[in-house]
Image (tube, rainbow, N blue to C red):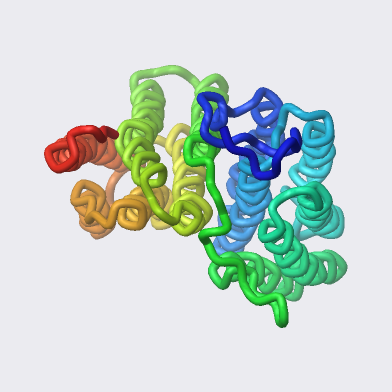
Amino acid sequence: MKSLASGAPLFRTRGNADSGKVSFIELFFDLVFVFAVTQISHSFLKHFTLEGAVQLGLMTMAVWWVWIFTAWVINWLNPETPQVRLMLIALMLLGLVMSTSIPKAFESSGMYFAIAYSLFHVGRTVFTVWVFRNGAPELRVNFIRILCWLALSGLFWVAGGFVNDSARLALWGVALLIEYVAPSVGFWLPKLGRTPTTVWDVESSHMAERCGLFIIIALGESILVTGATFAEIAWNPVTIAAFASAFAGTVAMWWIYFDATSKTGHYYLSQSSDPGKIARSAYTYTHLLLVAGIIVSAVADELVLAHPLGPAGAKTALVLLGGPALFLLGNLFFLRIVGGMFPIPYLAGLAALVVLAGFAGMLPALLLSILTTLLLAAVSIWGHVFCNQVSRKRSALSPSTNI
């Protein structure tokens, strides 16, 4: 059994049966992000415009970033210790303020969102630097680098909170650009250099499960939207069909990710000689596309339930097709990064969505919803077969390994 520092209970152990276990405090922490995802999708429905779509993208990127950075931190720290638990609870409070501010983040609540978001990032990283005073020196330097990058982006977040309209969007865009570029350059700093990915000793089981749980959070929003909207409308054969299509589409997304993508990715991450590099690209970046696709699909489900027989129109068609497209693209990139494979089922699904886009605006919203659901179901079945074939081929070469 290995630890990041000998005799240091604040660090997650490595190499035993429980080292990848997700704790109850982590699940409790995730409740804030259930609320955040709900706030994002509902805000987009209220501002269903191009500007609203840009704001949706920015908020989704921000919420995902504070969550995934925390998942990385807890991949190294022991959440069963009082200090780490208190840190997570403090982050929950900041996350709740941040999430509450989302609907009016580009209006009256921008300052509150920016301050809560920046304190979330900076506070968590300061705590981690403090913990690593007795830990691996290279990881402590890594978090000092991260702290500097997040402090820089925090200046743009807070400055954006004090201005209005396009200036706020621009400043927050710069802040996100800083944060998203940082891992790809190893958090490089003058004199301190950059952190090599080999330093990021990832507990693969924990990382895979944590990211899978956030996908569950996003899928849960689809279920909540579908159920809440269906409860408020008249039940008849048309609305029941819309309800069934929305539910089946959510199930298909679950099947695509958890039956094929997640299992395959976990295997390759656990076998990699540089798991930090794979986790940075495959989990930190590509899962954003998965989450965004699910959120957009949830918005589409609500629109179809509200107006199932009306023509889809450009906006509704865009979210009906765009959500699954983002989701399939995320799965495609993920498998390409972790396994170096070309997942043909996802490529075919994306091609079919492009074909549907050619005449989507002429179809009733319900029919387009049913077609996209059938497409996702077909991809889920094909993806299952494809990944099993990959598994069998690999097992033939190395019989001791299985996905």
Query: Where residue 318 sits in the image (x, y, percent)?
Result: 40, 55
- Seen at 76% across and 50% down, the residue is 132
Report which quarter residue 22 is drawn in. top right
What x and y, as percent, mark residue 372? Answer: 29, 41
Above or below residue 68? Residue 242 is: above
Quadrant where the image shows the N terminus: top right
* Quadrant in the rendering for residue 13: top right
Would residue 20 appear left or right of 261 to someone viewing this image?
Answer: right
Residue 5 versus residue 188: which sits nearer the camera? 5
Question: In the shown orientation, is residue 126 left or right of residue 291?
Answer: right
Residue 350 place in picture, x, y as percent: 26, 54
Residue at 72% in and 81% down: 191
Tell me if I can see residue 333 in this picture: yes
Question: What quarter of the picture does the C terminus occupy?
Answer: top left
In the picture provided, is 212 more to the left or to the right than 256?
Answer: right
Q: Nearer the viewer, residue 258 or 395?
A: 395
Report the label total: 0
Q: Measuring 80% from the left and 66% from the top, which residue is drawn there? A: 151
Is residue 302 in view?
A: no
Q: Is residue 214 above or below residue 160?
A: above
- The extreme front residue here reads 6
Which residue is the extreme one toward the bottom? 190
> Which image quarter: residue 10?
top right
Give me the residue at 77% from left, 71% from top: 152
Does residue 43 appear to the left or right of 94 in the view shown? left
